[in-house]
Image (cartoon, grey):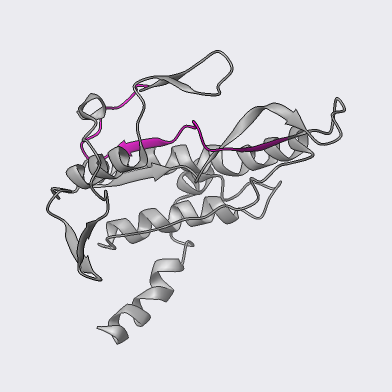
């Protein structure tokens, strides 16, 4: 099995046979960056269609405590097109219904500024009270927003989704009952949602 996995990698990572329209759709051929995240999104699709069960992509550098106006534009330019292309490509190949795409980070950012506080150089601090993630495919309802914050984006005021609720919902989409997925550690039964977590039915198709 290890040999077959290793020998399949050269073919998997060879994008030379991908049509130009697919490379353009993901943004691999753009000149303003090296196509790193775009290439990774395309590789993710190629892995998924070959039966890889879990693929993780990372795009670092979102910790903008300063120089936010310039940096956030570059970050979004890197990820927006290829992220949308991945979902579109999975859908057009009939793979999205059986694939969960999850996009997010571990916390949000404050709406108030920090740093030099000039027109072209300011930043945002960490904010764990509320932030957004998006998900697609795998039994989830498309084209909806769920939850809302107050006018200052400081607290959740409508349909809060705790991380345990989020995990419970994802596990449900994967066909796993989160209250039964337990493991024993130091004499106690644990689960990914601990003793919490409710399925968020409002986001299910």
Check residue 135 for magenta coloring: yes
Q: Which residue is drawn at 46% across and 52% down?
A: 41
Spot occupied by residue 45 in the image (x, y as percentages of width and height):
37, 53
Spot occupied by residue 179 in the image (x, y as percentages of width and height):
15, 48
Spot occupied by residue 139 in the image (x, y as percentages of width and height):
20, 36
* Quadrant the N terminus occupies: bottom left
Region rendered in magenta: 124-145
Residue 133 visible in the current orientation: yes
Quarter where residue 142 is shown: top left
From the viewer's perspective, is residue 194 above or below residue 148?
A: below
86 or 119: nearer the viewer: 119
* Quadrant the C terminus occupies: top left
Relative to 92, 13 lies left or right: right
Query: Which residue is most to the top?
Result: 151
Spot occupied by residue 184 in the image (x, y as percentages of width and height):
19, 67
Principal secondary structure, stretch drawn in magenta? loop
Check residue 139 for magenta coloring: yes
From the viewer's perspective, is residue 80 above or below residue 148?
A: below
Residue 94 visible in the current orientation: no
Quarter where residue 144 is shown: top left
From the viewer's perspective, is residue 110 above or below residue 185?
A: above
88 or 15: nearer the viewer: 88
Q: Residue at x 71, y 46 (%)?
A: 32
From the viewer's perspective, is residue 124 above or below residue 170?
A: above
41 or 191: nearer the viewer: 191
Q: Which residue is drawn at 49% across and 32% down?
A: 131
Relative to 139, 112 lies left or right: right
């Amino acid at each position: 099995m290890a040999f077959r996995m290793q020998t399949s990698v050269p073919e998997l990572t060879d994008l030379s046979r991908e049509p130009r329209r697919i490379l353009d759709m993901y943004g691999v051929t753009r000149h303003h960056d090296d196509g790193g995240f775009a290439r990774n999104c395309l590789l993710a699709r190629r892995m998924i269609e070959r039966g890889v069960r879990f693929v993780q992509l990372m795009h670092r550098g979102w910790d903008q405590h300063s120089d936010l106006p310039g940096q956030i534009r570059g970050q979004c330019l890197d990820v927006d097109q290829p992220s949308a292309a991945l979902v579109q490509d999975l859908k057009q190949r009939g793979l999205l219904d059986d694939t969960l795409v999850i996009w997010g980070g571990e916390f949000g950012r404050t709406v108030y500024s920090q740093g030099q506080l000039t027109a072209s150089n300011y930043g945002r601090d960490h904010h764990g009270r509320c932030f957004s993630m998006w998900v697609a495919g795998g039994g989830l309802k498309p084209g909806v927003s769920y939850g809302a914050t107050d006018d200052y984006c400081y607290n959740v005021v409508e349909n809060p989704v705790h991380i345990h609720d989020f995990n419970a919902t994802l596990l449900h989409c994967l066909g796993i009952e989160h209250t039964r997925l337990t493991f024993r550690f130091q004499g106690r039964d644990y689960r990914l949602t601990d003793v919490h977590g409710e399925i968020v039915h409002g986001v299910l198709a």
